[in-house]
Image: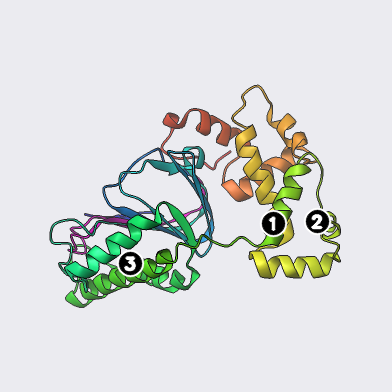
């Protein structure tokens, strides 16, 4: 099976002819979509090229992905997008099972290598790591999938696809073998703590810089270098993440939540929230409370 719908492309093991690959795909999300609790029989490798996605694991663990990070979720472990949704970003996923019958078919892996890889991945648990160096491989995968005619695939294209999938899995194994979770800089950790302690206030870059005893320009340069985003962007992201939780309380109006988060008006709050989540706060509230009402958000509001 190979299916292309808008920016989403997904496939099962019959498409690359590799029993080890039980599913895979990629999606460029411009707005949030629903992702209810689900499980896979194999390991699920997810990679985010840009944006932010938070996986919620059944045991209340959360895996936060930002651009250049990946996660491995163990077979049979129930997981979902935070609040049953995935927020905008460029996402890739590959589900693979080293223990499946004929797993080595059309791969470069021997049975011994597959057993070793299975041991490494299983020992990692559910974990997110920094694997930005895989970005080019995943983007190559997308370009290859975009160019594929599923009814007429040249042998050379099939070979390239199989080689690329093997390369991604092998290189991912190296990253996850280290079992080093994505290192969040002390600057990011301390900044998030400060923002959460002053959620109801209008926080400026100058406020954060003062907290670190730095000038705004020096702090901004340091923050961008260490965290990969501007301080202003980070402030908005933290506040909007807090908003997704507050919106679950139906007794609080969107306007009240806007003021609780230090926004000057509900209109400004809505515009910032939509920038990061692709929909208005009221749409997010409706969907997070009643996810069965729609397969995806509408961005018309």
- Residue 177 image label: none
Disc 3: which residue = 169
Between discs 1 and 3, the one toward the N terminus: 3
Judge from the rendering whether residue 165 lies leftward or rightward of residue 112; answer left or right: right
- Residue 208 image label: 2
The one nearer the camera, 140 or 229, is 229
Between discs 2 and 1, the one toward the N terminus: 2
Q: Position of residue 69 (x, y in %)?
A: 49, 62
Q: Secondary structure at mark 1?
A: helix
**Residue 8 visible in the shown view:** no
Judge from the rendering whether residue 114 lies leftward or rightward of residue 205; answer left or right: left
Residue at 69% in and 27% down? 253
Point out the stretch of residues depicted in magenta. 11-32
Mark 3 is surrounded, within 10 Å at the Cα level, by few (under 14), some (14 to 19) or many (20 or more) other residues, namely some
**Residue 246 visible in the shown view:** yes
Disc 1: which residue = 233
* Image height of 239 relative to 232, above or below: above
Q: Position of residue 220 (x, y in %)?
A: 77, 66
């Amino acid at each position: 099976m190979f299916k292309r719908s808008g920016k989403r492309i997904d496939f099962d093991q019959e498409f690359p002819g590799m029993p080890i690959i039980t599913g895979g795909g990629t999606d460029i999300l411009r707005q949030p979509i629903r992702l209810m609790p689900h499980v896979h029989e194999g390991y699920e490798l997810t990679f985010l090229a840009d944006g932010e996605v938070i996986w919620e694991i059944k045991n209340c663990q959360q895996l936060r992905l930002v651009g250049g990070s990946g996660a491995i979720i163990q077979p049979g472990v129930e997981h979902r997008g935070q609040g049953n949704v995935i927020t905008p970003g460029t996402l890739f996923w590959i589900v693979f099972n080293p223990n499946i019958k004929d797993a080595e078919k059309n791969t470069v892996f021997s049975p011994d290598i597959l057993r070793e890889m299975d041991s490494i991945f299983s020992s990692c648990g559910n974990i997110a790591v920094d694997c930005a160096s895989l970005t080019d491989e995943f983007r190559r995968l997308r370009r290859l999938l975009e160019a594929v005619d599923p009814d007429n695939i040249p042998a050379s294209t099939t070979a390239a696809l199989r080689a690329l999938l093997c390369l991604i899995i092998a290189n991912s194994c190296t990253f996850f073998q280290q079992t080093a979770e994505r290192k969040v800089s002390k600057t990011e950790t301390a900044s998030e703590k400060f923002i959460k302690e002053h959620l109801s206030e209008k926080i400026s870059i100058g406020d954060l810089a003062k907290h670190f005893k730095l000038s705004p320009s020096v702090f901004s340069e340091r923050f961008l270098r260490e965290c990969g985003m501007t301080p202003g962007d980070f402030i908005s992201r933290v506040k909007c993440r807090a908003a997704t939780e507050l919106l679950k309380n139906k007794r609080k109006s969107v306007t009240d939540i806007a003021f609780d988060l230090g926004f000057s008006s509900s209109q400004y709050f809505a515009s910032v929230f939509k920038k990061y989540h692709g929909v208005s706060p009221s749409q997010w509230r409706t969907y997070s409370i009643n996810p069965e009402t729609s397969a995806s958000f509408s961005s018309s509001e």
